[in-house]
Amino acid sequence: MSTHAKKDQGPEEEALYEPRIVAFCCNWCSYAGADLAGTTRIQYPPNVRIVRVMCSGRVDPAFVLKAFELGADGVLVAGCHPADCHYINGNEKAAMRGDFLSSFLEDAGIESQRFRIEWIAGSEGQKFAKVVKDMVSELQRLGPIYAEEG
Ligand code: FES
């Protein structure tokens, strides 16, 4: 992973900062929730790029680290609620990896608030929108993950 530093921002720069979020969404619940948010025209910030995966348990920690390396300011892993995983316990595995990732990121100098795991059902378009809004607010407070070059 390349070196990074937080940008020293004033209030005006902070207002202009639009964080980039990569969201790994499980096909069966969270992706459907994101889709519902779109089809029912629930407003949420356009800062998120969704990567559809079959299950949150499919998200290797390396995917999250790669997203940060490639410039994401925040990463979301979203899956089915506990006991609703279509692959029995993929979301439990994702949660365990999430605990590991949070402490790993802190050790690497990346605020753990930049990484979130959420359970979002296919009927929860509102929740998907709220999670994205909350992440954008939090990331705007933290500032960009990498300093501008040059
Ligand atoms: Fe959704 Fe496993 S299928 S978390």
Image: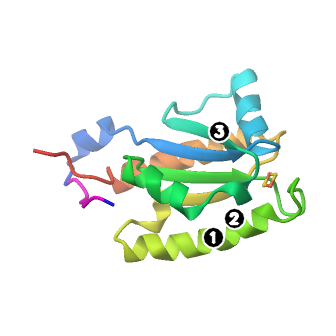
| Nearer to me, 119 or 101 | 101
Q: Secondary structure at mark 1?
A: helix
Q: Amino acid at mark 2?
A: Ala
90 relative to 44, above or below: below
39 relative to 93, above or below: above
Sequence-wise first label, 1 or 3: 1
* Residue 4 included in the magenta stretch of the image: yes
Instruction: Give the position of the N terminus as an image quadrant.
Output: bottom left
Q: Which residue is mark 1?
A: 97
Q: Are marks 1 and 2 in contact (CB under 8 Å)?
A: yes
Residue 144 x/y as whole percent:
32, 50
Q: Amino acid at mark 3?
A: Ala
Q: Secondary structure at mark 3?
A: helix
Q: Residue 129: give its label.
A: 3
- Whether ligand 1 has any atom under 8 Å from the Cβ at mark 2 is answered as yes
Residue 130 x/y as whole percent:
64, 44
Q: Residue 94: give its label.
A: 2
Q: Which residue: 62% across, 47% down?
A: 24
The 10 Å Cα crowd at callout 1, few under 14, some 14 to 19, many 20 or more, is some
Q: Secondary structure at mark 2?
A: helix
Q: Which residue: 24% across, 40% down?
A: 13
| Mark in the foreground, 3 or 2 | 2
The 10 Å Cα crowd at callout 2, few under 14, some 14 to 19, many 20 or more, is many
Looking at this view, name the residue that lies furthest to the left. Answer: 150
Q: Amino acid at mark 1?
A: Arg
Sequence-wise first label, 3 or 2: 2
Q: Which residue: 58% across, 45% down?
A: 23
Residue 138 in view here = no
Q: Tell me where residue 145 sits by quadrant.
A: bottom left
Magenta part of the chain: 2-7
Q: Is residue 76 left or right of residue 125?
A: left
